[in-house]
């Protein structure tokens, strides 16, 4: 009877729990939906919307006044300026007209004229290029063909130089519409050969904006979360490297006729078979044998070969991958930061990994550059060195030592008890930094350009390549040949590799944790001693000593001296004092464990004698 009386209350309680559980699940689902809404892409709504059309920068300025105003005087906007705009705006003319036209006397033979003469502003229909390196000029011939003039102004050296695109001028190689217009205008219509705006304006990177503008107009001044999600879904945020790559690239249209992609809009697949074909790395007319660009304007080509382009995919292969990885492995973090700053999302509610649904990209152009930062050199988000070490350092978000490039290069503490050694490169007056070697100026066919492969040009690889300077002998001028420098690099790296292998082979279950940390620091740095050999050697020496591989002797810079004497006998190296390992309090080495074990046995035996044997004798 009692069991029956208890049955109904138990069933009721169970049902209440079930209902409460479903209610909580529904509530959580709604909360999750709200969190994701901050930057969701309303795919169905976008698919049903009319194809977006170009509206022009003036429409963008209505809401984005400051950004649009900054854009007006940027290199992007001024990459193509008409003669009419030059006449109407004195400020723009003063910024854009850099050439000394009087100095061009006798340099151009115009069709129908008897002799060569100089050019004047009357001959200019458009200025081509904002003038960071060179500036060219477009003229309109009598048949209304727009033709690039065969001379260009060298901005850096303040002189005219020939622009030899063909043996004669005019020539199809100089035709503006077929060679330049795709990257120097916004909203180019390939069928009509017309464009919406001169220069690289808002919609060149963010895509046609009519749908975005219509949603904004409907929403008014007070916008809800759902309206913001719809609004952001109707525009491209230009975080994909392909948006920049459509112009900062060398390649051809699928038919091989044009040097820019056809019918590409931000969000499309630039490298699709029917859109654009980049020149392969083995194309000797565009690449050095080292895999560095031979021509300017190949940033995207080079980036494709770099580990930056695969940074997200590489990280996702790790079992430890999580939201904390995005700050260095994906440009999605740029968008996440914006959502938090503008309070469209909140850190305690928003899952950063959700951003990958829309921004599944690694380290792209936008990770380092912000085209809206018009006052910054090359639109950088921060100082170059600060940008590099914001990711290439031992992050606290990871377990154990992870990629400690900054710590190794500068000589900062990594492993408790091992004194750091300041890097000679870092401490040298006007010494090299990341960019010196990893983004060195490569002498292309049109002047020096910063490499975007992020791979140093090694002396051995560049030794027999005409016109290519390696990353080392520019500073190490006392080295007789690049081959000697390469031999030194190989010796140092082989020395480190051999020592790492020996340590790994001798590590066991009883090896102290700090030994693994020292090894992780050396391997994580990735340079095999080149960033800072003295510090690398100090880390390895401490580990070797602990494992009994050497008898307390230091290799530090003495090891480098030995290697230099073998490879470069005439090069002087100043040794750095060897760091000493501070004894670790409580560290349990193999000898100490043996001693402790013996002591334990003695104590146990004494206790046994005292208590057990003593009791028997009573």
Image (cartoon, rainbow, N blue to C red):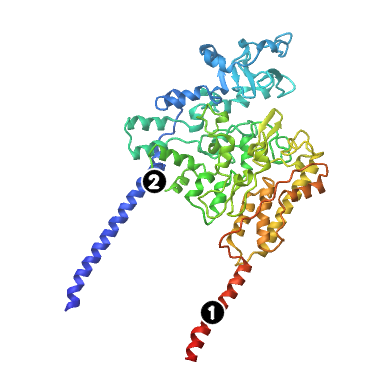
Kindly state the secondary structure of the residue where label 1 is placed.
helix
Above or below: residue 477 compared with residue 85: below
| Picture disc at residue 114 | none
Marks counted in the figure total 2
Q: Which residue does the image show at 59% across and 43% down from the upper left?
A: 308
Kindly state the secondary structure of the residue where label 2 is placed.
helix
Sort mark 1 into few (<14), some (14-19) or many (20+) by Cα contacts within 10 Å.
Answer: few
Depth check, front residue: 310 or 549: 549
Sequence-first tag of 2 and 1? 2
Q: Nearer the viewer, mark 2 or mark 1?
A: 1
500 horizontally vs 584: left or right: right
Judge whether residue 237 can be spotted in this image. yes
Residue 279's x, y, as percent? 67, 38
Above or below: residue 595 compared with residue 384: below
Q: Name the image quarter holding residue 427.
A: top right
Task: Check the image and name the residue furthest to the front.
Answer: 618
Depth check, front residue: 545 or 242: 545
Task: Check the image and name the residue furthest to the bottom.
Answer: 617
| Picture disc at residue 604 | 1
Residue 281's x, y, as percent? 69, 41
For the residues labelled 2 and 1, the Cα–Cα distance comes to 63 Å
Q: Which residue does the image show at 51% across and 81% down from the upper left?
A: 607
Judge whether residue 280 can be spotted in this image. no
Q: Which residue does the image show at 25% across and 66% down from the upper left?
A: 14
| Picture disc at residue 36 | 2
Q: Which residue does the image show at 38% across and 42% down from the upper left?
A: 345
């Amino acid at each position: 009877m009692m069991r029956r009386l208890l049955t109904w209350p138990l069933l009721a309680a169970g049902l209440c729990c079930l209902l409460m559980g479903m209610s909580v699940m529904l509530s959580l689902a709604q909360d999750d939906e709200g969190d994701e809404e901050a930057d969701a892409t309303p795919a169905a709504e976008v698919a049903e919307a009319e194809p977006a059309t170009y509206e022009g920068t003036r429409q963008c300025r209505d809401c984005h006044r400051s950004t649009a105003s900054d854009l007006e005087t940027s290199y992007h906007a001024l990459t193509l300026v008409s003669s009419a705009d030059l006449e109407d705006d004195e400020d723009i003319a003063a910024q854009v007209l850099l050439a000394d036209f009087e100095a061009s006397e006798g340099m151009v033979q115009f069709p129908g004229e008897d002799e060569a003469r100089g050019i004047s502003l009357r001959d200019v229909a458009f200025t081509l290029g904002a003038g960071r390196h060179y500036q060219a000029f477009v003229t309109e011939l009598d048949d209304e063909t727009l033709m690039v003039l065969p001379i260009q102004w060298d901005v850096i050296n303040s002189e005219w130089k020939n622009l030899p695109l063909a043996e004669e001028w005019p020539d199809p190689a100089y035709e503006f519409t077929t060679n330049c217009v795709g990257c120097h205008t916004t909203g180019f219509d390939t069928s009509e050969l017309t464009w919406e705006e001169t220069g690289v304006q808002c919609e060149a990177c963010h895509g046609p904006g009519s749908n975005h503008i219509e949603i904004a107009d409907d929403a008014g001044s007070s916008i809800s979360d759902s309206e913001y999600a719809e609004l952001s879904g109707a525009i491209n945020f230009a975080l994909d490297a392909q948006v920049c790559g459509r112009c900062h690239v060398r390649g051809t249209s699928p038919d091989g006729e044009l040097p820019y992609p056809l019918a590409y809009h931000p969000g499309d697949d630039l490298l699709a078979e029917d859109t654009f074909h980049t020149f392969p790395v083995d194309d000797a007319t565009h690449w050095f044998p080292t895999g560095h660009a031979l021509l300017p304007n190949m940033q995207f080509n080079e980036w494709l070969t770099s580990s930056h382009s695969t940074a997200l995919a590489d990280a996702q292969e790790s079992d430890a991958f999580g939201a904390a990885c995005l700050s260095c492995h994906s440009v999605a973090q740029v968008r996440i930061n914006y959502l938090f700053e503008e309070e469209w999302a909140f850190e305690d509610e928003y899952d950063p990994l959700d951003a990958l649904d829309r921004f599944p990209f690694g380290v792209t152009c936008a990770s380092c550059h912000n085209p809206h930062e018009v006052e910054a050199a090359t639109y950088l988000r921060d100082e170059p060195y600060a940008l590099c070490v914001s990711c290439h350092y031992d992050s606290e978000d990871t377990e154990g030592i992870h990629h400690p490039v900054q710590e190794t290069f500068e000589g900062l503490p990594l492993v408790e008890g091992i004194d750091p050694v300041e890097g000679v490169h870092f401490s040298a007056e006007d010494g090299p930094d990341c960019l010196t070697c990893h983004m060195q100026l490569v002498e292309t066919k049109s002047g020096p350009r910063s490499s975007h492969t992020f791979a140093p040009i090694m002396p051995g690889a560049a030794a027999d390549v005409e016109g290519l300077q390696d990353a080392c002998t520019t500073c190490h001028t006392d080295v007789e040949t690049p081959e000697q420098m390469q031999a030194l690099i190989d010796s140092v790296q082989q020395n480190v590799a051999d020592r790492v292998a020996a340590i790994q082979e001798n590590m066991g279950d009883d090896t102290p944790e700090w030994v693994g940390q020292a090894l992780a620091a050396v391997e994580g740095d990735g340079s095999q001693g080149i960033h800072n050999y003295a510090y690398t050697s100090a880390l390895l020496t401490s580990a070797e000593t602990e494992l009994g591989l050497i008898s307390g002797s230091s290799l530090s810079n003495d090891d480098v001296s030995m290697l230099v004497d073998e490879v470069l006998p005439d090069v002087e190296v100043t040794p750095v004092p060897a760091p000493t390992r501070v004894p670790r309090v409580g560290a349990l080495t193999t000898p100490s464990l043996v001693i402790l074990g013996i002591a334990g046995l003695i104590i146990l035996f004494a206790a046994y004698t005292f208590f057990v044997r003593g009791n028997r004798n009573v």
